[in-house]
Amino acid sequence: MSAQDAHYAGELVDGARILALFGDLATELLIRLDGNEGLFRAYETVEFLAPVFAGDYVEVTGELTAVGHTSRQMRFEARKVIAAGSRSGWGESDAPADPRAPGAADVLRDPIVVARAVGTCVVPRSLQRKPRELYLPGLPAGPAPTTGAVTPPPPGSDGEVILTAAIVGAELTRAKTPHLPITPDEVADEAARCREAGAAIIHLHVRDDDGRNTQSAERFSRVIDAIRSKCDCIIQASTGGAIGMSLDERASPLVCRPEMATLNCGTINFGDDVFVNSRPDIRALARRIRAAGVLPELECYEVGHVEEALALASEGLVPMPLHFQFVLGVKGAIGAREDVVLFLRSLVPSAATWAIAAMGRFQQPLTELGMRLGGHARVGIEDNIYISRSVLAEGSAPLVGRAAAYARSIGRPVADPAQARLLLGLGESR
Ligand code: KMH
Ligand code: ZN
């Protein structure tokens, strides 16, 4: 901060100077993301936390925290890293012998956060130019990933995202959305559209001719054949079925030899119902999945379900490395929040893969957060029927397409089914 930046008595710098730095950062982020400078629309919050003086050095960082159709939300932080010597009497540094010596300045062992802000910029669609990749500056290793930071991929990996499309569900009805596929042909067409949009896995429930959920092996077989005739997606059969089904019913699709199947790892309140998964039943299903040579995806709706999945692994009932689905925001179970994701992620072994399936309006922000944190994502109308507020998604493919675009925007390629099979260890003996 130069003498020209000092605006008030005592060489105090005005807050607008810091906001100008945030504005420059916002512009850089927009250019990196959209190839356009964009416009700042509004600050949601601004906090000035410590004084800045002429002679101080201030470093600012900015992170993209949400990307909408045209809006880009960002978070900024300004930290004082060097304090002008004449100010060391403010207790900000290890005071040198003579802090008033000409030119004296102190590097602060612990930088001081002087301001924080959250703001939103816009880049109209017509001005968005997609750079071929997101060019990230070579930043030094910083603190642990937070909401906006993108976790670098593990060495030797391009960090591909596996997108799962949950295209039918068990509870959804045509009354809630006319875009629910029911017949084998409708389901297969929707699977193919999702594959086109970027899905590698189809999470599958099936319906009878009247649209009622069924776990009938015969119906699963017809639908799986129809999907396989139209696309090469990995098919993940639900063994959750619908509330109240018996274990035998739930296990029936396994005879169709899907490549994957869900294994629900605990009981929860599921809206006003109870989705029962007793420990003996979980183990019985795990044994059946293993006997069928099918890869289980570990559905965890609560923290304790992750612990249970780890217990199954130590009992040899599920193969390593594990693949988790954190299902967040079911009414009656754990919420769809960042702190929840960070904690769940901290529980899983480093070799495991994990994804987020978040309900309703949480689907977009939480799957995007998961992708930034190195996870995979499940989207689709089983979990969320809207593409934006009050606007129905025309099936699951637009939701997949949006997730794929976001993955690419943060530098993560979207895995095709063959890449997903490699990442999940499918095809290896289990
Ligand atoms: N229909 C829910 C009760 C799964 O597919 O494995 C269970 C469910 C989970 O959808
Ligand atoms: Zn399901």
Image: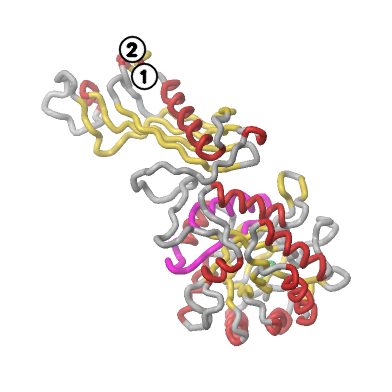
Q: As shown in the figure, which amino acid type bears the numbered disc 2? A: Ala
The region drawn magenta spans 346-374
For residue 107, above or below residue 269: above
For residue 12, above or below residue 209: above
Tell me the element at label 2: helix
Mark 1 vs mark 2, CA separation in Å: 9 Å
Q: Quadrant of ligand 2?
A: bottom right
Q: Name the colour scheme.
A: secondary structure
Q: Which residue is mark 1?
A: 13
Is 397 magenta? The answer is no
Q: Residue at x 79, y 81 (%)?
A: 218
Q: Residue at x 53, y 35 (%)?
A: 30
Question: Is the Cβ of the residue at disc 1 closer than 8 Å to that at disc 2?
Answer: no
Is 365 magenta? The answer is yes
Residue 243 in view, yes or no: no
Within 10 Å of the Cα at label 2, are there few (<14), some (14-19), or many (20+) other Cα atoms?
Answer: few
Q: Quadrant of the N terminus?
A: top left
Tell me the element at label 1: strand
Q: Is residue 207 left or right of residue 299?
A: right
Within 10 Å of the Cα at label 1, are there few (<14), some (14-19), or many (20+) other Cα atoms?
Answer: many
| Residue 399 percent location from the top left of the image | 68, 53
Q: Which residue is mark 2?
A: 9
Please state which of residues 167 and 389 is positioned toward the viewer in this rendering: 167
Q: Is residue 123 left or right of residue 114?
A: right
| Residue 220 percent location from the top left of the image | 76, 77
Check residue 128 in the rendering and tell me which mark sits there, or answer none.
none
Please state which of residues 75 and 69 is positioned toward the viewer in this rendering: 69
| Residue 67 percent location from the top left of the image | 59, 42
Q: As shown in the figure, which amino acid type bears the numbered disc 1? A: Val
Q: Residue at x 46, y 25 (%)?
A: 19
